[in-house]
Structures are given as C-alpha cells and as structure tokens.
Amino acid sequence: MNKRTLGWVALMAALSLSPLAHARPDTTAPPADLKQLRQEVQMLKQRLQVVEQQLQQATATSKQASVDSKEAREEAERARTATAAIAAPENPDIKFRLSGTVVANYTATDSKMMHDTFTGGSFMPIFLVRYKNLMELEAHMEVSNNGNETETSLEYAQLDLFLNDWSTLVAGKFLSPIGQFQQAQHPPWINKLPDRPAGFVEGGGGEPLSTVGVQLTGAFPVGHATADYAVFVGNGPQMTDEGLTLEGFSQDNNANKSVGARIGLRPWVGVNMGLSAMHAQVPTNVDGWTGAGTSAAYDLVDADFAWTPDNGEIRGEYIHSRLDPVFFDDGTGAAPFLTQRSRWNMWYLQGAYRLGALLGGDNPYLRNVELIVRRSHRQVDGGTEDWRFDNENRWTLGVDYWFGPTLVGKLAYERKTFQVRPDDNVIRAQLALGF
Amino acid sequence: MNMHVRHRFNPLMVLLLGVALSGTALAATGGAAAPAQNSADKTARSTPAPNPALQKALQVARGAKEWHAVCGSCHNLRDPRELTDNEWEVAMGQMRVRAHLTGLQERDITAFLKASN
C-alpha cells in the first residue's frame, strides 16, 4: 500500500466514524432520568427473581406430581392384580356360584281351620362349587320362619361326579329323580303358581321329595332325539307323625334300601316325557308304626310329560303308589289297629299362556302377563283317617306378572273341594325372585 | 325271622342295580356302546376341524339352539349377561344333572352363553 492509498483510507475512516460520535451516551443527561432507569432496572431484577422462584416452585411441584403419579399407577396396578386374583383368577380349578330363591307370600281363605296370613319370607340359597370339569357340589338350604322361630333345613347336598358325556354319578342327599315336578318345577321362580299341586306337597304328600344314597344319571342321543335316565339306591321313606314320609333320611333304620329309576325322552323340541318307578320296604318299629311283617312294601309308578311351545306350556304328572297294611300302636295304651292297604292316586294338569303373545306382544306391560290354569287331584284310599283327610280336587286360576326372567309376582284363586271336610276358597299372592 | 329279611335284595332292586352297573360300564368305556349320535354330535365328530374359528362358531350355534330348546322348556331364558363366564360354567354343571344334558350339550350351551356374555 502506497502513501496515496493510505491517505484515502484514513479519510474514509474518519468520515464513517463521525456519526458514531454523535450516538454515544449523553454524559450530560439529567440525573433524574438516570435515577429512573436505575429504579426500573432494579424493579425488573426483583420481578425476575420472583419469576425464578415461581419457576423453581413449579418445577418442584411437577417433579412431585410425577412421583405421585407413578406411585398411583403402581398402586392401581397392584390393586388390579390383587382384585383379579380374587374375583377372576386365570383358569381356576375351583369355581363358585351362589344362587337360590327368595319368596314372600300372602294367603286369604274362607276356611275355619286357618286365618288370612302373611307368610314370612323364605330364603333358599344354593351353594354351587365346581372342581375343574370333574365334579360339582350342590347344597340347597332353606331358611324360613315358623311362628316366632327361624327354621333352617337342608333340602339337598350332593356331589356330582361327571364320569363321561353320558353319565354322572351323584352321591349324598339329592332331589328325587321320580317324575318332573320335584326335579325341575318346584323352585318358586319356576313354578308358575304360588303353591304346589294337591298331593305334590311336603309333609305327608305322595310325591318322593329327596333321597339319601347314590344315583347314576345322564343322557344320550337317540337319532335326533335325546333320552335320559336316572337309577338310584337310597335309605328310603320312613313313618313319621305325618304318616309315610318320602324324604331323604340321613340314617336308615332297616337293612332294606329303596330303589328307583326314571327314563325320559325328548323326541322333539319342546316335548319331554318320562316314566318312573320306585320300590322300598318301609322300616318297622318306628314311633309306634309296625309293619304287618317286619316291614311294609311300598311301590310307586309315575308318568310325566311337558309340551312347551313358544309363549305357552302344557304339562302334567300322574303318580300311583301303594303301601302294604301297617300296624299302629301309639304307645298310650289305646288298642293298636291295622291299616288297610293304602293307595295314593295323584295328578295335575297345567296350562299357561303369555297374554302378550295373544295381543300381539307390542304392549310392554301386557307381554309380561301370563295366565295359568291348573287342575290337581289327591286321593288316598285305605290308610288312616288322617291320610284321607286331605283328599281333594283343586282348581287353580292364576295370573303372573314377570318383572324379569326370574322375578315374578303371582296372584291365584283356588277352589278346593274336599271329601271329608268343608270346601275351601283360597286367594294366594306371592313374590318370588330367583338369582 | 321273616321272609323280608331273607329276601333283602328284591328282583326290582337287582334289575336296577344291573342297569346301574351297565351305566358304569358305559362310563368306563367312554361311551363306546352309546347309540347313534344325534346331528349335533355327528357335526362335532365327523366334520374336519381345520378351522378353529369355524368350529367355535358351529359350537355357539348349536348351543344357542339347545339353550332355547332345553333351558326354555322348564323356565324363562335368562339374559346371558346376568352371570360371568365362570358363573355360567358352574350353573351349567348343575343344569347338566338337573335338566339331563349330555356333556356335549353342556359345553355347547356354555360356549353360547360365554359368547353372548
């Protein structure tokens, strides 16, 4: 670079720096503005400190929330795992279910033998336990009021061992497989009327209710139909204060066992029919009752059928049974007597129809209404006067309202015509829930 | 001593025990002596099973039919959603005895109820 060029550069630098000289802070500014600026700077510093503190607090809160959230998730996972283990274990070997029935009744009658009455609610739980696909436990209790006392009874308690697709071995106290009513129709949420048919009752009735023993039962296909069978051996009936009692006694008091069987057929959809038979030797020397020999032979035959098309049903059952002559000595010194051969003839025929089906089924209330009519008959010949006391012909007209598939309100009128005592008109109401 | 004591096992009892023993023998042989199978059984046994989903669908369809025909012949049909899958398994075990179902019918109806639950 020569001197001439250096001179031009110096001149240009001088010219370019001259505006900057004018932009420099005015050191001659008034002191008041400087003081104001310093105050503003100080205020901004203070605000910045507040913001920094708030930021620090927010950061700490966020960290804590994150920790809490993680702990909450872990706690929820532990709870879910524990609940799943209790409520729905994966592939459990043992599964449990509680079912049953609750009922409440009201009865109005013109009989002089009883008053109109509410009947205390009965609670009938059924405990079901299944072990794999091998076995099932069924236990049915009944808790009810009798006067001022609460009664508890065991209707049945049985073990079902599934042998194969066609056979199940049942042991314990089980419902009698004779006929159909006791086996499948007697639960109050299934029975369409508030009471059982004449003669098909507990306590002195002619229908076997339960047996203590073993039973082999099952079903197998026959073409397009299905046949079923049940064969049982049990302790058998005994004499009690109510007469011949066809219930399962936990201990036998003679060496003879009762035997019985039922074979059924479902030939078409909605049709079910069956034949049953039973034989027993009624124990002797029990509570004043003595057989003509050392025991009295008891024999029973039963026929049942059901036709259940959509919106209706017709079903019925007939029982004929007989008991050999029996001596009776009540132990009071009164002369003992010999009963004649006793014969029971009982049957019922029942029809039901959903009113909604008749009226088109569009009305949400009418379609839940069901009309029922039942004719039942109980006839005992021979035996004692007590046994013949309840011989009757009975007409029952009922109307049900189904609040749900297993919740029903029933109202029924009964006309009971007896042989040896005044006739009776009865109105029954019942609310029953199956669960 | 009387005649009833001497004849403790009457002919009817012997006959019924014979039926029971026959049933037990049937059980021991896995039902080999069972009569011809019904259509559902035939479907389950004779149809090849290359497609599990198809087999499952057929089982559910059979179960729906049996559910309506068998369960509905005794009582109102309950909503399948009323019970859990496990509860239906237990309930159907009880109904297998009470309603005289074959094992196949029980499994088919249970499959339908679970599928509808």
Image (tube, rainbow, N blue to C red):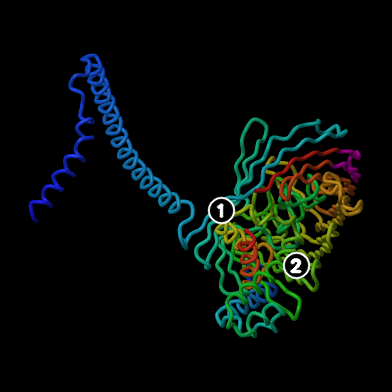
In the image, A306 versus A256, the foreground residue is A306
Image coords of residue A167 (percent x, y) = 61, 73
Quick check: do tags 2 and 1 share a chain?
A: yes
What residue would you read off at disc 1?
A97
Q: Amino acid at mark 1?
A: Arg
| Magenta span includes A217 | no
In this picture, which residue range is highlighted in magenta?
A412-426
Q: Quadrant of the N terminus of chain A?
A: bottom left
Tally of numbered discs: 2
The secondary structure making up most of the magenta span is: strand
- In three-dimensional space, the C-alpha distance between marks 2 and 1, rounded to whole angstroms, equals 31 Å
User: Hey, which quadrant is residue A109 in on the image?
Assistant: top right
Task: Give left or right: position of A11 versus A205.
Answer: left
Query: Which residue is rendered at x = 80% and y = 72% of the image?
Result: A268
Image coords of residue A416 (percent x, y) = 89, 43
Mark 1 belongs to chain: A
| Magenta span includes A425 | yes
Residue A377 in view here? no
Image coords of residue A169 (percent x, y) = 58, 68
Of callouts 2 and 1, the N-terminal one: 1
Residue A75 in view here? yes
Q: Is residue A32 above or below residue A170?
A: above
Which residue is at the far front?
A4
Mark 2 or mark 1, whichever is nearer to me: 1
Q: Residues within 10 Å of mark 2 (few under 14, many from 20)?
A: many
What residue would you read off at disc 2?
A276
Query: Which residue is rendered at x = 71% and y = 47% of the image?
Result: A329
Q: Residues within 10 Å of mark 1 (few under 14, many from 20)?
A: some
In the image, B48 versus A46, the foreground residue is A46
User: Hey, which quadrant is residue B89 in on the image?
Assistant: bottom right
Query: Which residue is rendered at x = 61% and y = 85% of the image?
Result: B48
